[in-house]
Image: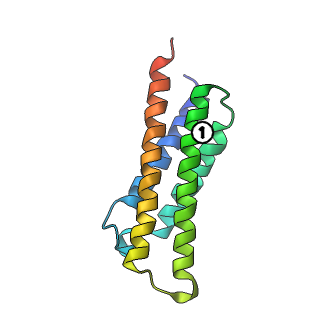
Amino acid sequence: MNFEKVVFAFFIILAMSLNFGFFIGEIAEPAHHHPYELFAALVVSLICTIMKFGDRTQFGSTVLASSLVVDGLLIAAAISWALATTGGQTMSPMTMASITSLAGGALIANIISVILLIIETSQVRK
């Protein structure tokens, strides 16, 4: 068993799980989406992206591209959340729906990363 591959798969699946945990719930209800969960999903996603820079294959390029999409969407969601709540403002349902939609797009890209990981793992010969 390759310990590096285990850690890599762990972080990819953790990123997807945290993103799903943030995404699930009523789309426009701020009480259903915690900012720390969005922050955790973003941090783990950035760790995954850094880990993917070592792979020089075409397959690795595709996985890296999906990870960069996740990072971009989660960063946009975090910036939107920060801008919406600066100065003690309350979160509007429309803004929360936008943030949750960005996280949903990131979730789709995370799912693609996990599918690609499964495909790569199934192609490895013993």
Q: Residues within 10 Å of mark 1 (few under 14, many from 20)?
A: many
| Amino acid type assigned to the residue bearing label 1 in the image | Leu
Residue 7 seen: no
Residue 87 coordinates in the image, percent (x, y): 57, 88
Relative to the observer, which residue lies in front, 56 or 22? 56
Q: Quadrant of residue 103?
A: bottom left
Position of residue 114 relative to residue 103, above or below, is above
- Is any part of residue 92 visible from this angle? yes
The relative height of residue 89 versus residue 73 in the rendered view (above or below) is below
- Residue beneath label 1, please? 64
Residue 10 locus on image (x, y percent) = 51, 39
Total number of numbered discs in the rendering? 1
Q: Residue at x 63, y 37 (%)?
A: 52
- SS at badge 1: helix
x 47%, y 45%: residue: 110
Hey, which quadrant is residue 49 in on the image? top right
